[in-house]
Image (cartoon, rainbow, N blue to C red):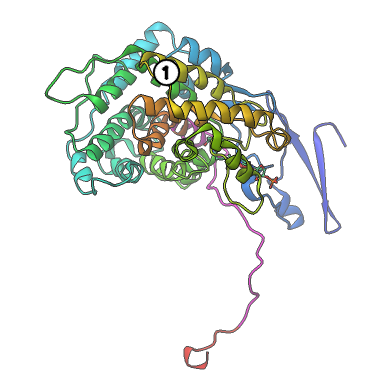
Amino acid sequence: MSANSARITGDNKTFETSVKLGSVGPSVIDISKLYAEIGMFTYDPGYTSTASCESKITYIDGDVGVLLYRGYPIEQLAEHGDFLETCYLLLYGELPTPAQKADFDYRITRHTVVHEQMARFYQGFRRDAHPMSVMVACVGALSAFYHDSTDISDPQQRMIASMRMIAKMPTLAAMAYKYTVGQPFIYPKNELDYTSNFLRMCYAVPCEEYKVNPVLARALDRIFILHADHEQNASTSTVRLAGSSGANPFACIAAGIACLWGPAHGGANEAALKMLAEIGTVDRIPQYIARAKDKNDPFRLMGFGHRVYKNYDPRAKIMQRTTHEVLAELGIKDDPLLDVAIELERIALHDDYFIEKKLYPNIDFYSGITLKAMGFPTSMFTVLFAVARTVGWIAQWKEMIEDPSQRIGRPRQLYTGATERDYVPLSRR
Ligand code: CMC
């Protein structure tokens, strides 16, 4: 057997296949012909050992805590670039030249307005609706407004749909927020950069001028960069699976938003903040640590642990610094939630249970505190995550559509239900 081949034996049958090598990271055993050759499937609930696709976009080494977008370390992008530069990089594969960047910024900015009829969708919701429910509906509804960019076989339409998604998400998200607080929607202002525009659409009111705080705008822009993509996570895989059937990109992103909402995924920042508030004071931390360790208690420390990172999440380190910058800018010195967060982190990092299971704070642990300090209600946290992740979803969707080996996604199963039996009429049951 050569170094690049593999053999799987089961049921006295042997399957010989090749090993595919990535540019970095684990190789994969190609099992695409396994069923055809030996009549068996592989079994991997939660896809812990299964690569669902080939991708050139994002690389994570969870053991050492590395995250690269198109080869560039997240720390460098967050330190030196802005969010739209990251969007360009994820979409096109290379960093833009100054002229390309200016052109891209211009084109995104010119797509920020949403069709006026979209406002009617918001009016149909209760004011206390969770903004993620509004986002699932309104993003899906975009496909009813932009028919000229839903032909996925046309590369130009695919790119226009991608631009529209990136440009319109902040507008839709800000509208969801404004609707909740009962204030009028604020139209985008093209002279502002992407993130400042978003802050203004959230916090401006028609009766007075709104001045964007550059420190907060930079912090939020960095949060967007940190959340922009994360390879084949649950929501991205959802977008790819939805897109594999040929569904239009707006519908696919709506599916991604629905998946992101869950507390084990994008909903974790909201859940982490609620947990910090529930703990309340530093002296109550030990009882929550004890609960997290108790096998009979479903409680988990929200904002800790990650499927891929078995080391410190590199995004969490940047996020921690950003949190301190924002709190200093806003003059928040003694935030009880921050005290609880810092102490919780300290205890967990020294506790045998968390060390043994490699449970480190993840990005959501700190992002919630930062967003709260900026004035966002907890219900908006996951919406902000969705705004940032849209570029990752759309870049992954485009990559999939443009991959010649792309087929409809169709996992198989291990059936353990009843074997064939005859129908019994209702009167005889
Ligand atoms: N608190 C206490 N114990 C935990 C935690 C936690 N937060 N996370 C995992 N464990 C334990 C778990 O009980 C299990 O123990 P045992 O081996 O004794 O059964 C072990 O660690 C492995 O956990 P797992 O559930 O098999 O790990 P997973 O890879 O399936 O889950 C996770 C990853 C992120 C869903 C999980 O760590 C979790 O629920 N964390 C809290 C929610 C959270 O912060 N999610 C945000 C993820 S980062 C943002 C994103 O990418 O969307």
Question: Along the line of sight, which residue is nearer the eye, 414 or 230?
Answer: 230
Left or right: 354, with 223 as reference point: right
Q: Quadrant of residue 311?
A: top right
Q: Residue at the spot x=30%, y=14% of the render?
A: 213
Q: Is residue 275 above or below residue 105?
A: below
Badge 1 element: loop
Question: Along the line of sight, which residue is nearer the eye, 353 or 92?
Answer: 353
Looking at this view, name the residue that lies furthest to the top: 98
Q: Quadrant of residue 394?
A: top left
- Numbered range of the magenta stretch: 394-421
Looking at this view, name the residue that lies furthest to the bottom: 428
Does residue 57 appear in the picture of this structure?
A: no
Query: How far across and down, in percent of the image, does residue 340 sit?
Result: 51, 30
Question: Along the line of sight, which residue is nearer the eye, 60 or 150?
Answer: 60
Does residue 179 appear in the picture of this structure?
A: yes
Q: Is mark 1 within 8 Å of ligand 1?
A: no
Q: Which residue is mark 1?
A: 333
Query: How far across and down, in percent of the image, does residue 34 sit?
Result: 73, 50
Q: Is residue 342 above or below residue 104?
A: below
Query: How far across and down, in percent of the image, does residue 262 sit?
Result: 47, 45
Amino acid identity at mark 1: Lys
Q: Residue at the spot x=59%, y=28% of the render?
A: 345
Looking at this view, name the residue that lies furthest to the front: 283
**Residue 77 among those drawn in magenta:** no
